[in-house]
Amino acid sequence: MILGKIHSSPAPIVLGETNSGVQAVQNALSGGLDITIVGGNDFYSQRAKLEQLGLPRTISSLSSIPPFCPTGVQLSDVHKTGLGSSAALITSLTSALLVHLSAIPVSALAEDGSEGRRLAHNLAQFVHCVAQGKVGSGFDVSAAVFGSHLYTRFDPAVIQDLMGESLPKLLPVLSPSNAAWNYRIQNFKLPPYTRIMLADVDAGSDTPSLVGKVLKWRKEKSAEANALWTHLDQLNQTLAQTLLQLSKLHDKDIKSYRSAVKYISTLQPLQWEANPLQPAAQEPIVATFSKVHTLSQDIRAKMKEMGELAGVPIEPDEQTRLLDVCVSQAGVIGGGVPGAGGYDAVWLLVCDPSSSKSDPSPLQRVEHIWNNYTNLNVSPLSSKESLAKGIRLESVNDIPGLAGVLASAA
């Protein structure tokens, strides 16, 4: 948890002449401004806290940890889990300031494609790039702003001129009306009766360092890199469309879809299509799940190849061995390393049937492996897919534990 207080009123960075005017912004800051920043538990390793409480490393145990639990270490020693904490922090802070200073209306964050939300996106992307010292892909900030979606990045040139020490006026560049912001977002959600599982592993990675080495390799070995990059992009696009196809199959025949999910949740992926007596209505559903499994394995292979060629541990051997065990379990659809990879975390997509006679469930099987795995110290995270649309205004009392944290920081 990070707590900070700002009592002075330094010269603000001015986006431009807003409706309120520069003077109104300065007046709003003249009395000082208290800022409290707290981190959700899943952004940071809770392994030590579980051990302190004498609890097993399971998802249910995580509910016993108080929300916004202090990490107990210096900021430089915090073990992050690689889920985009930096992007989430910057996005929430910059968006809150935009609303507080009336640069965007309160209603802006209630609308998916509003100019205010897009300004919040552009500003957060810029600040995040400055913080990291380079123009990254921006997918983590985009997820924080817009929620779950398929993302096509913006042209880095749009903010390249802002990365120097001498800043020109920001608004002409960061304005949502600037057509150079050519990112694209498309709706996306996971298939029904599936859930994402995430686990924290031994040690967090330095994302800028990993990404920097990959970009260096891509520049020096452009032909080799572009061929692999293109293939990986095709696999990712196909995976996304295949996952969306499962939602369509569910909507077309809910009963058969539910039955198919229950069926594959009891079998290893290599057995899913081996039943000659499988009902005809379930065959295309099972085949599509099998395709997702194959695609996720192909993506893992390409990510690992990229890491080997670039000389960085995108999917380290330790993670490879863990993932190989996990994705061979009954009801596990696929898995990999999130974000830029490295020694941060692993993800799995598992079947989550509405009711199942299987004992244990896919989730319980995976938890058992993680809890008993000895080659890495694996601890689950409670995060799962959110259907909320990214950055939004919340009532303090609607967030468990937040009112208490704010009171103690006052």
Image (tube, rainbow, N blue to C red):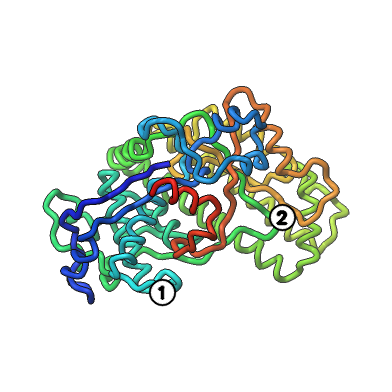
- Residue shown at 58% from the left, 61% from the top: 189
- Residue shown at 40% from the left, 33% from the top: 309
* Callout count: 2
**Label 2, label 1: how far apart the Cα atoms are:** 44 Å
Residue 110 appearing in the image: yes
Q: Nearer the viewer, residue 204 or 282?
A: 204
The local crowd at label 2, few if under 14, some if 14 to 19, many if 20 or more residues have their Cα within 10 Å, is some
**Residue occupied by mark 1:** 107
Q: Name which quarter of the figure residue 308 lies in.
A: top left
Q: Earlier in the sequence, mark 2 or mark 1?
A: 1
Q: Name which quarter of the figure residue 23 lies in.
A: bottom left
Task: Determine the secondary structure under disc 2.
Answer: helix
Amino acid identity at mark 1? Ser
Labelled disc at residue 287: 2
Which of labels 2 and 1 is toward the front? Answer: 1
Query: Please, is residue 253 above or below residue 385 in the view?
Result: below
Residue 297 appearing in the image: no
- Residue shown at 85% from the left, 51% from the top: 276
Q: Nearer the viewer, residue 396 or 298?
A: 396
Q: Is residue 338 left or right of residue 196?
A: left
- List x then y, in percent, for residue 324: 63, 34
- List x then y, in percent, for residue 378: 59, 31
- Residue shown at 37% from the left, 42% from the top: 225
Task: Determine the secondary structure under disc 1.
Answer: helix
**What residue occupies the far right of the structure in this picture?**
277
